[in-house]
Image (spheres, helix red, strand yellow):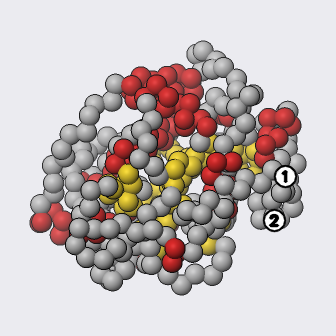
Amino acid sequence: MLTKTARIAPYRAFSHRGKLGDMHRPQTLSQIAPARERRRPFRRGTLHAALLLAAGIWMANAPAFAKNPNCTLAQKKSADKWLWLNARDKDLSLKQNLPWGAPTATAPTTNEHLLIHWDYVIGYDDDLRVPLWTGERVVGSKLGNTTRSDCFRPDPRLDPSVSASLDDYDEPIYDQGHITPSADVTISKISVWNSFVLSNMTPQYAVFNRGIWRKLEDLARRWAIANGTAYILTGSIFDRDNNGLRDPDSVAPQMKPRKGLPRVAIPSAFYKIVTIEQPDHSLKTIAFILPNTPTAVPSKQTLGYLGSSIVTIEAVERFTGLDLFPAGPAITQSNALWPIPMAAPRNSSKRKHKPT
């Protein structure tokens, strides 16, 4: 529990469901980073310092990307059959992957709906043709059981008019960037193959997807290993006008494929929220927003860059127009998951909360 108000001063004016205090409300992506002057050095011997040190070593020596084997047509058809869940299995998946409720739009929508897998859940936007978010439970002991095998394909559950296609990604700038990464769902080949449906993809600059974003994905898995289980929300942000609010779908820029018309929207940034449930069922979280840019982050700057990208859940909710934990208990965004002393308790009521 925090005892010094100063540690959460940059965020003390916000409340979850009410309006944010204007003096402290983050307005743009450039204003969401926490104050840095109060950083505290790592404590040697702690789990978190060791975890981050190991991550830094791995990142500095990460191998270059190699060509992954492709699944066959027969394997694609086999995997597709597992995308069609009955009502009971959909309910089980929602309870397993989103125990505190699926993220809910704060304004009425007609073009967004759920695509439910065994291993993760997608909040999909038919107009943008990308996932707005995915939610998953990552069990540390089940990671690494299956190697990657590329199985990119349209989602058969979607009508072609609202689904991205392989032709849409036939252009020189962007990767087919996973929102739920295949390395998170390595419990079986089917699970890996079904992370490659295009409903789980967004346009990501290649240097972003293969660089800082991949490193954040790896850190999220390390939190799952260190804590046994982690619940991870990952999603897209559309804020090209940089006003701190979600843009209308109609103004989102789209990829320009070599053939055909632009159809798939390009997010301006991405977020990832890692949640660890405590023995008393309270939640500790850490949230990041990373801009989708073609600028490489040197390995030696990885932890500093990610540390400066830590934000509050409220900031993510404002950028996305979502209530991310609609049925969640008390949530504390805490330096328990990162050495940077930035924290703020999240209150589910409409009243402004006080720091503790």
Residue 121 visible from this viewpoint: no
In depth, the one of 20 and 85 nearer the eye is 20
Q: In this rendering, would 120 be left or right of 344?
A: left
User: Spatial distance from mark 1 to mark 2, Cα to Cα?
Assistant: 15 Å
User: Disc count in the image?
Assistant: 2
Query: Residue 344, relative to residue 38: is it above or below?
Result: below
Please tell me whether residue 62 is drawn above or below residue 310 in the rendered image: above
Depicted 198 relative to depicted 289: above or below: below
The x and y percentages for residue 263 are 36, 74
Q: Is residue 79 left or right of residue 335?
A: left
Quadrant in which the C terminus is drawn: top right
Q: Quadrant of residue 198?
A: bottom left
Task: State the residue at coordinates (30%, 77%).
Answer: 261
Along the line of sight, which residue is nearer the eye, 121 or 210?
Answer: 210
Q: Which x, y percent locates residue 69?
A: 15, 49
Q: Position of residue 322 (x, y in %)?
A: 63, 67
Q: Quadrant of the N terminus?
A: top right
Which residue matches tag 2? Answer: 18
Left or right: 58 as drawn, with respect to 302? left
Amino acid type, callout 1: Met
SS for tag 1? Answer: loop
| Residue at position x 49%, y 32% in the image | 302
What is the x, y in percent for residue 44? 60, 15
What's under tag 2, amino acid-wise? Gly
Residue wearing tag 1: 23
Q: Residue furthest top?
A: 44
Q: Earlier in the sequence, mark 1 or mark 2?
A: 2
- Which picture quadrant has residue 176? bottom left
Left or right: where does residue 260 sit relative to residue 316?
Answer: left
Residue 352 position by quadrant: bottom right
Frontmost residue, 15 versus 144 = 15
